[in-house]
Amino acid sequence: MFNFLKKKKREPENLAEIFSYFEKLENNFEELSKELEKLKKESKFSLQKIGILRYNPFSDVGSNQSFSIAVLDGRDDGLVITSLYAREGNRIYGKPIKEGNSEYSLSKEEKEAIKIAQNKNKNGDKNKRKLNNPAAGSGGYGPR
């Protein structure tokens, strides 16, 4: 019905046309290879690994309402954000991460969040924890 939209491909008539097609394909392949290498280099700077750890740092406050989140790029640079929930209030801290470490001291939970993020690409979802465990009072949102 809509044959007018389809282009008819013309068969090559001689060997010279076939070689011409191969040259065009080779040039296209080289351009695509260069573009792919460029994208690989650029993607190392994009945020691609996220690790989250929920925990209870204080014995007088119930449930796991505190958390540490690590967000890293392909070179393990990024940041870690920690939220500590207590009865008196909530404190939020942010620390820069360079090559998986920080110039500031990291808590064991922050180190664990970084480790989870670093292992995301290596092990797929094997490191997935039960993030919003209803028993922990998290409301049941998110992956299980």
Image: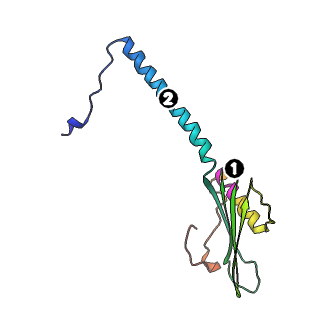
Give the magenta part as a residue range.
Answer: 117-122
Please state which amino acid type lies under the numbered disc 1.
Arg
- The residue that appears at 30% across and 26% down in the rendered structure is 9
In this view, 4 is above or below 139: above
Q: Quadrant of the C terminus?
A: bottom right
Is residue 40 shown left or right of residue 6? right
In the foreground, 129 or 50: 50
Where residue 19 sits, quadrant-wise, is: top left
Q: Earlier in the sequence, mark 1 or mark 2?
A: 2
Q: Residue at x 63, y 79 (%)?
A: 135
Which element carries disc 1, helix, strand or loop? loop
Location of the N terminus (image quadrant): top left
Say few, some or many: other residues with alpha carbon within 10 Å of mark 2 (under 14 / 14 to 19 / 20 or more): few
- Is most of the magenta stretch helix, strand or loop? helix
Residue appearing at x 51%, y 31% in the figure: 31
101 versus 142 height, above or below: above
Where in the figure is residue 139, as x and y percent of width and height? 57, 78
Side (left or right) of 104 relative to 87: right
Write down the residue under mark 2. 29
Is residue 89 positioned above or below 35 on the image?
Answer: below
Q: Is residue 41 magenta?
A: no
The amino acid beneath tag 2 is Phe
Say whether residue 54 is visible.
no
Q: Residue furthest top?
A: 15
Residue highlighted by disc 1: 75
Q: CA distance from mark 1 to mark 2?
A: 28 Å
Q: Residue placed at 67% from the left, 59% from the top?
A: 127
Could you tell whether 136 is left or right of 5 in the image?
A: right
Residue 46 in percent (x, y) is at 60, 52
